[in-house]
Image: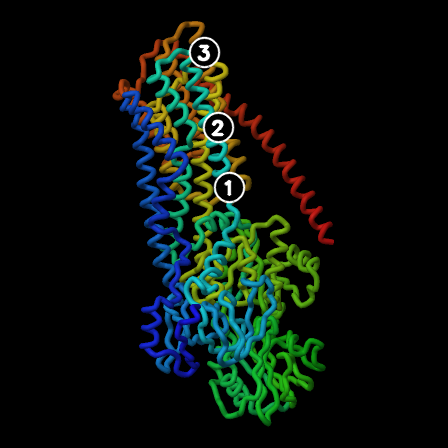
Amino acid sequence: MDDGQQRYDSDCRTGLTDGQVKSRIDAGLTNAYNTNTTKSYRQIFKDNLVTFFNILNMVFTVLIVMTGYIKELVFLLVVVGNLVIGIAQEIVTKKTLDKLSVIVAAKVTVVRNGAEKEIGVADIVLDDVMQLRPGNQVCADGVMLEGSVEVNESLITGESDVVAKGPGDFLYSGSFIVSGNAYARVERVGIENYANKISYDAKASKKRTSELRNSLNRILKIISIIIVPVGILLFLKQGLVVGLPIPDNTVKTVGALIGMIPEGLILLTSISLATSAVILATKQTLVQDLYCIETLARVDILCLDKTGTITEGKMHVEEVIPVGAAKDLDRILSNMAGALQDDNATFHAVVEKFGKSFGHEVKTIVPFSSARKYSGVSFEGEGTYFLGAFEFIFPNGYAGLDAEKYAKQGSRVLVLAHSDATDVLDNKVPGGMRPIAFLLISDRIRADAKKTLEFFEKQQVELKIISGDSPVTAGAIAKRAGVKNYEAVDATLLKTKEDIEAAAEKYSVFGRVTPSQKKELIAALKRKGHTVAMAGDGVNDVLALKESDCSIAMASGSDAAKNIANLVLLDSNFATMPDIVNEGRKVINNIERVATLFITKTVYAVLLAFATVILLDSSYPFTPLQMTLISFVTIGFPAFFLALEPNFAPIKEHFLINILKKSLPGGLSVIIGILAVNVLAGIFQYTPAAVSTMCMLMAVAVGMWVVAKVSMPFTTARKVILGSAIGLFILCIIFLRGFFDVAPISLPQAVVVCVFTAVAPFMMRGFERIVEKRADKFLSKKIVRRSLQITDDELKKK
């Protein structure tokens, strides 16, 4: 901050006045800073307009206008249509996601005019006093004024250990409160505040590698490298060798280059993902990273905390079981509830049951931590009381007591313990602790939990229940919910990474898991080649959410969890997960299906351009107008409808290889047909116009066979789509023959086209077998290399 800026020494009781806040706003000293991960309107227009292929299309347009063949500019209708649709869809998606983002946007409680007030993070001003509770993400750099907290600074330092903070200590924005309560004065805001950078970077850092995006970028990169030099060579060949006039040469060259561009494929992908985001918004799901839809569709392991997912997340104290001659349990628990300020489901259940009392002087407080799994209070003259997990308060057990017998009923079991000691060092259990009661707390299983779990089992998605409860309780609840492999492992026994890796493969239910162990479990599964999603809502889930391939948070959860998540369930209902997975699968399966149509055309257009330069004595057979017609009837029209069909089959790996296996046979078949026509043209002296028409008919015939191939198994709708595409083409060549330069062909020439059309599927099948064999061989080598790499990495670690 500017050293000359007046500072207000606001305290935690009064905070700033309205006048002071206004002066800060007038001076621009607010926390407003654009960290929205959706594009700005300017960026949307720029990304859609300024692309390599759009620049090429502009060059093509100028060249064709110079030739005078104005009707060849029909391809611009597709280009402009793609632009308008793409921009419009991105704007709709932006508005939808921005609107939903407001719902889950982090809020902060500040003290102003002597009263607490909840405001948006952007409305914080310099010297505001923030109240911080467990689960809050620190949204502005500040200095502690009062209270004590434990802070996780892993998003800043990379270290997962909690750090204790007291009055006078500095709080870094981007960290989050694990336990305790405090007041802090804001020291930095706006662009100088690290929170604005960390909140954006946290979201950006979890954008996972997308196989879909990488595959499409690889295709476009190859085309962008070859398209200009091939165009130059083709122009020179047709001008110097074939002897085409410059206008005709220009049109033919532009036709060849337009054919190489998979026009609309990137647009279709973006629209499909954006449409899915809007569809999911209607299902109360906020998508914070479009490509996470793809990732979730590829997930084969889903990790989740049972609280709030399998169970309702609303805890109730069902029974208090005294141990020995314990008395005044209600008084003790209500005074503990009054002293502690924990913010979790278990503590709320205790408050609901016993209320809050303030009859004893508090000496020391031990706030709850998911790593410790207990909290405690030292009262003056009363000693110390701890409430938490039995095995964490009594790690060596306690003679004659067995907490597991209650846990086997599916209840969460807490032990209330007492010690005469009043000095608690480093939040550790003091000596002389003895149990005085068990609290049995239950959380009801969701009515739709069993159905949801059955869905994932049928979809070959393995579930991992990761819980902080005892393994007995976690296992019992998993069994009641319908989890088949409900035998639970005690995470406290997993001491090394090797132990965690072995357990990750063997078990489906984990109990007494610490936040760092959750992260290690997910990392271990990823090292084994799994695509892992994590669903959680608490501070203790943040490290695991950040580590996962796809992170899902509940809107009712902590700020830290929502900020880090790729998806936020606005209704906090895990039962919507099947709809989300199905939407992702529909998108990826359909993109793979229609990408086959686009790449088939690109394959034969590229190969035909090379063949024209190297092998053929004639010019390129297609004009831009003819290529536009071919693209529309074999790609654009069927792709529009096929991309909308429900298709919930499990996603196959190797997106690029899958589409090449399907598109190469079609592309190669077109080339064989065109080469054969050119051979026959040399023998029987076909006219260039007849050759062009025959090649166009062959390209459309193969294109229709490819449409038929990707439409299998046929449904009534798919038959209608294929039939309509064929019908549209027939109508065009009958009624718009002159417009599309379709020349009359003789009976022998028609027979050649018909024979090729009949033979094409068999030819494609032959090429398909060759391509599949080569692809399988390539994948086998790739898998072996990956296995060797994993083994080598493991040896290096050891």
Residue 252 placement (x, y as % from top left): 37, 20
The picture quadrant where one finds residue 600 is top left
Q: Secondary structure at mark 3?
A: loop
The residue carrying mark 1 is: 214
| Inter-mark Cα distance, 3 to 2 | 22 Å
Q: Judge left or right: residue 651 versus residue 83.
A: right
Name the residue type under label 2: Ile
| Residue depicted at 60% across the width and 33% down the height | 776
Q: Residues within 10 Å of mark 1 (few under 14, many from 20)?
A: few
| Residue depicted at 63% across the width and 88% down the height | 422
| Inter-mark Cα distance, 3 to 1 | 38 Å
Name the residue type under label 1: Asn
In the picture as drawn, the residue positioned furthest to the left comes out as 735
Q: Residues within 10 Å of mark 3 (few under 14, many from 20)?
A: some
Q: Judge left or right: residue 781 versus residue 148.
A: right
Name the residue type under label 3: Asp
Q: In the image, which disc is placed on residue 617?
A: 3
Position of residue 88 relative to residue 80, above or below, is below
Q: Judge left or right: residue 335 versus residue 587.
A: right
The answer to which of 715 and 263 lies nearer the viewer is 263
| Inter-mark Cα distance, 2 to 1 | 19 Å
Q: In the image, which disc is placed on residue 226?
A: 2
